[in-house]
Image (tube, coloured by chain):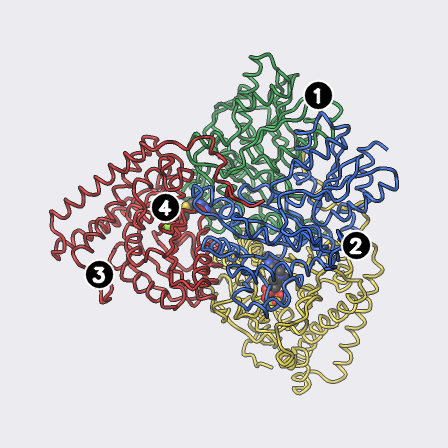
Chain colours: A red, B yellow, C blue, D green
Amino acid sequence: MSETSDPKVHLTRSHVRALYQEMLRIRRFEEKCAELYTQEKIRGFLHLYIGEEAIAVGVMQALQPLDAVVATYREHGHALARGIEMGRVMAEMLGRQDGCSRGHGGSMHIFDAATRFYGGNAIVGGGLPLAVGLALADRMQGRPQVTVCFFGEGAVAEGEFHESMNLAALWQLPVLFVCENNLYAMGTALAISESETDIHRKAESYRMPAAAVDGMDVVAVETAARRAVEAIRGGAGPVFLECRTYRFRAHSMFDAQLYRSKDEIEAWKAKCPIEHLRAWALQAGSLHAEDLTAVEADVLAELDAAVAFAEASPWEPVERLLADVMTPEAPS
Amino acid sequence: MSETSDPKVHLTRSHVRALYQEMLRIRRFEEKCAELYTQEKIRGFLHLYIGEEAIAVGVMQALQPLDAVVATYREHGHALARGIEMGRVMAEMLGRQDGCSRGHGGSMHIFDAATRFYGGNAIVGGGLPLAVGLALADRMQGRPQVTVCFFGEGAVAEGEFHESMNLAALWQLPVLFVCENNLYAMGTALAISESETDIHRKAESYRMPAAAVDGMDVVAVETAARRAVEAIRGGAGPVFLECRTYRFRAHSMFDAQLYRSKDEIEAWKAKCPIEHLRAWALQAGSLHAEDLTAVEADVLAELDAAVAFAEASPWEPVERLLADVMTPEAPS
Amino acid sequence: MSGTSAGGAEITYRDAVREALREVLQQDPRTFLMGEDVGRYGGCYAVSKGLLDEFGPERIRDTPLSEAGFVGAGIGAALGGMRPIVEVMTVNFSMLCLDQILNTAATIRHMSGGQFSVPLVIRMATGAGRQLAAQHSHSLENWYAHIPGIRVVAPATVTDARFMLRTALLDPDPVLIFEHVMLYNMTGSLDPAADPVDIDRAAVRRPGRDVTLITYGGSLWKTLVAATELAGQGIEAEVIDLRSLRPLDDATITASVRRTRRAVIVDEGWRSGSLAAEISARIVEQCFWSLDAPVGRVCSAEVPIPYPKHLEDAALPQTPAIVAAARSVVGR
Amino acid sequence: MSGTSAGGAEITYRDAVREALREVLQQDPRTFLMGEDVGRYGGCYAVSKGLLDEFGPERIRDTPLSEAGFVGAGIGAALGGMRPIVEVMTVNFSMLCLDQILNTAATIRHMSGGQFSVPLVIRMATGAGRQLAAQHSHSLENWYAHIPGIRVVAPATVTDARFMLRTALLDPDPVLIFEHVMLYNMTGSLDPAADPVDIDRAAVRRPGRDVTLITYGGSLWKTLVAATELAGQGIEAEVIDLRSLRPLDDATITASVRRTRRAVIVDEGWRSGSLAAEISARIVEQCFWSLDAPVGRVCSAEVPIPYPKHLEDAALPQTPAIVAAARSVVGR
Ligand SMILES: Cc1ncc(C[n+]2csc(CCOP(=O)(O)OP(=O)(O)O)c2C)c(N)n1
Ligand SMILES: Cc1ncc(C[n+]2csc(CCOP(=O)(O)OP(=O)(O)O)c2C)c(N)n1
Ligand SMILES: [Mg+2]
Ligand SMILES: [Mg+2]
């Protein structure tokens, strides 16, 4: 585990436990989702975040309640780490009325007004301009808030990435861009999609401060995120963080993974962020075996309750099919 | 005038004269266009290149007949320098049948199959992907050709710029990207549109070799272009050239130029590429006063003939309104 | 052309739009105008001239050439509590931000289960008639009118240009305002009774009993001229200005057609797949048994709009064609 | 679902598309397939699986996530003498390259006065039914069918999936091929007589005398089921598969409707501004005096498609609605 000189990351027992628990919540939640998918209770596209949990968990530590979050279609982890109730996220996965988006969106479209969680966007790169605008609104209204925008390294090739980076840097907006570089966009390896594979160096061409961080190390991510968010909140303009990571599972449930080797997958699995934190915490004495057991039990209890809540939730009645297309109270 | 160590640019009398004449052709042509615009013989948007002639003329020196050119809506200079007959370009300005695009396109849409001149594109940034594809076709067919793509610095903010730069660099395609940085996109100064105002540095983030060159110096442009085209033809992949220049006239005929000062305009006019070459050539003895007179006379004769040709050209008959929407010989 | 209604103050359409902008900017600090060259240049069509001095560069915000970026930023800013007015210079360029409009602005309310509204106004210039040729002359309002989750309006009179914006800004959902380029120079008198205006209802601009002519935007004036001509031939045409293209005001249309038993739709969009087709289909669905003749359509020829005046004129709906179509359905 | 026609070989729609690709790749060295994940991943819907091994990475070209870039590159490559087949994963993503399709591919022939053709094929998946929710489920074929300068086809049978591609590649102009996502797994038998196929004409998939049901793509099969059901109720429906959406085959439609005197159009697009509207308008224009009832439309509800199965089903045209609409126009 990386040592940190930043005073902001206090590796107290409770904090280490929280980091561990947050990552485990995501892991167990998604393992359950995969199971529910095979049972056909979850349908459509399901993109698992397994292996990448340290990023969402690390970054969210740096946020305040009124900060905003924009994520992608691989956003269960972000939703949970941001504090959306697991039951509501699970209900969304099942398409139920108590889902955080009333079940309209499913896996790819998780939204939550209370935590300023703006999706859940299944257009690669589509969330970046939104983040720019959210930050612009905060700035124009004099609010000291930060918008965090998560996206994959595949999105870097999109025009919307480029336009958003320039706007944010030009207008010096309070955005933290977090690139989750898991080396593949579906089956397309980074070297097949970018002429410059050192992604964080691209930020320099917008004069945006950037850093690369080990995305398998939750403390490293938290440290980098805290530093960045502090700078942004202080008015330094946008910051770019490239988190180097790997998805342990297929891109979605339809992927035969012809494009990468078992060896490569195994090598990365050995860097599992959860295992990594556990081993370090046990060795450092931050956590004891009974803490781990207790955390696991907590998580499983939460998960069971979430599934039960979701399965008990009603379906949106067909009469509401058109209800949320336009705001009802539109004038005239 | 910049000295050149590149053996490829031979400043023989005839070459200097040709450079001078080419620039003067563009200048006089466009002055005439402005006049014809006030006479309402040319309509629509008219974007003059006056002040920027050194770029088109310098770059075209480096091309072979089978190379391809992609330009913008400010492309009269490129069309003339590429060798499209002045009469056909003028007829296009007037919307006549003998125009190089049968008059369909006018000022913004000059095309010519014979010289592989692919427009004439009035969507800012829209030509860049096209250039990538033309180069891809050459490469896939084993042809040693280069595609030159001209665009303004305003286009750099567009997503299509970003996607095209990456594709060209990733696939190592034979494209010369020529950014005509005249400091303004309509009324928007560079510093208001780009967080990184040193445009050629943006090319580095695609790992594309780049250079900035004095766009008011035709020899400097030719030198840089020859060097780049030679490298590209040799298989080095794409190259980016930023030519620093200024438009002496308004953006189009509707522009009150509220956004820049008279002083700034005058300062740049003092760097006029044509005056600049003339003064240098006279001093160096490459050209004599009578050469200049002869060139001016040649150009005016060509221009008069072009206008006469254009004005004598018939209108496309209304019956052909739909004729060029689809290729007539489409199967089935 | 004169857009005279009742006896109010004379004003140009351009000034009416500017006054509308000034008013909302003065009244609501959450409002700002953003787009290419809206500030220092004064607007591509001089609509926003002077506003920069009055409201400053934060609220009259010049953007880089990044249509997806700044439209997306407008969506984000709306989500963040602002009331952005985004200007897209010309509907052809809006192809570059259609992803943001369709996949985000129009969709996020539904996807989020009704949690988020996007109180955004997008203004675009549309239409032909200025000899701007194949990439600046289209009328794609029909595409936008196809999208659930947004509202689309087309002010054809100075009164609507002056007052629709305020109502649009009160709407919690995205509203697109289409301004036909040929209207900006039109003078008309403001209807003092029109404030506040609804933006849902079509208006009968001329009563008549023999045939209903349905149109919107720039074609309204050609249609009114045709109606006058028809009156001279003993045919009293009722002229409906749709005003709102989504939703369509079926009640006004069907009430008129049931009375006149004949209808012609005049729409500058290309014929196949035009908005006119939708109106025709609705008339047939709702008034079939009242119809005494097939519903007529006068639309643009299916060609990218050509540059020369005679061909541009031939491509667009013109008064003689409207008269002919009306006579044909009336049968004399 | 089974797409059986005559007694040829059984094949899935997916395999039929793949065989079509293999054939053209083998026969014409100018042909190549380009798009996101067409190579190493094997295609988002597994259509191109195996082709990379057979044809190599130059001709089965994985692209970065840059829709505008690689579609534009396809246009350029077509201009440069290649015969590109560009795959856009899903029609929703095609918003990102619509500028290139509308403003360049469809327009360059006209703008250039007929000098340049763009022999490009673009394939896109379209439609709903897989619970992919609000950003992956739309049917925007109507938008493309509105654009002059391109051809749009929608193979609904395995035979058309197998043979339309070859004809499309022979076309000197851009052809868009829409493949409905629900068809890929469908099995049918290849019509051995169908080769070579025209791509201009609609096909009568079922003869009938009482009502004409007009449809295309994924809705064909629901419509045929409805026709069978109607037959059980004594109503003989003729079913027309449009096959070509631009141009529309008016002759086949009007011949049928003049005979049956009644028509219903089934179209998965949102109702307002649907392709169904255009067909309805044409029927009224061309067959008004033969019609015994208003033309019916069965379209999608005007809502971004919801995720849960029951709501998705409710949003889309289904067999009972088709039966009901047919009964309603038949009046029993
Ligand atoms: C504009 C667009 N193009 C293509 C897709 C299909 N698609 C979905 S996810 C994905 C890969 C994205 O990769 P990356 O950005 O690296 O994120 P990751 O999935 O690795 O987290 C693709 C191509 C899409 N959703 N949107
Ligand atoms: C996509 C798009 N957006 C906006 C415009 C309107 N427009 C035409 S030229 C221009 C300025 C372009 O500036 P630059 O690229 O620097 O080229 P320059 O005109 O200076 O040669 C703008 C904004 C356009 N034609 N296309
Ligand atoms: Mg990735
Ligand atoms: Mg410029």
| Quadrant holding the N terminus of chain B | bottom right
Residue placed most toward the observer, A315 or D83: A315
Callouts 1 and 3 on one subunit:
no
Q: Secondary structure at mark 4?
A: loop
Please state the horizontal and vertical placement of residue C47, each as a whole percent of the image: 65, 62
Residue type, numbered disc 3: Ser
Q: Say whether mark 2 and mark 3 are on the same chain.
A: no
The answer to whether residue B67 is visible is: no
Label 1 packing within 10 angstroms: few (<14), some (14-19), many (20+): some
SS label for mark 3: loop
> In this image, B273 relative to D165: left or right?
right
Residue A280, quarter of picture:
bottom left
Chain ID at mark 4: A
Q: Is residue A28 visible?
A: yes
The disc label shown at residue A74, or none: 4
Q: Chain of mark 3?
A: A
- Residue with the mark numbered 1: D292
Q: Position of residue D230 (x, y in %)?
A: 57, 16
Q: Please state which of the two labelled residues, at mark 3 or mark 2, is closer to the viewer.
A: 3
Labels 1 and 4 positioned on one and the same chain: no
- Whether discs 2 and 1 lie on one chain: the answer is no
- Sequence order check: which comes first, mark 4 or mark 3? 3
Q: Are marks 1 and 4 in contact (CB under 8 Å)?
A: no
Q: Amino acid at mark 1?
A: Asp
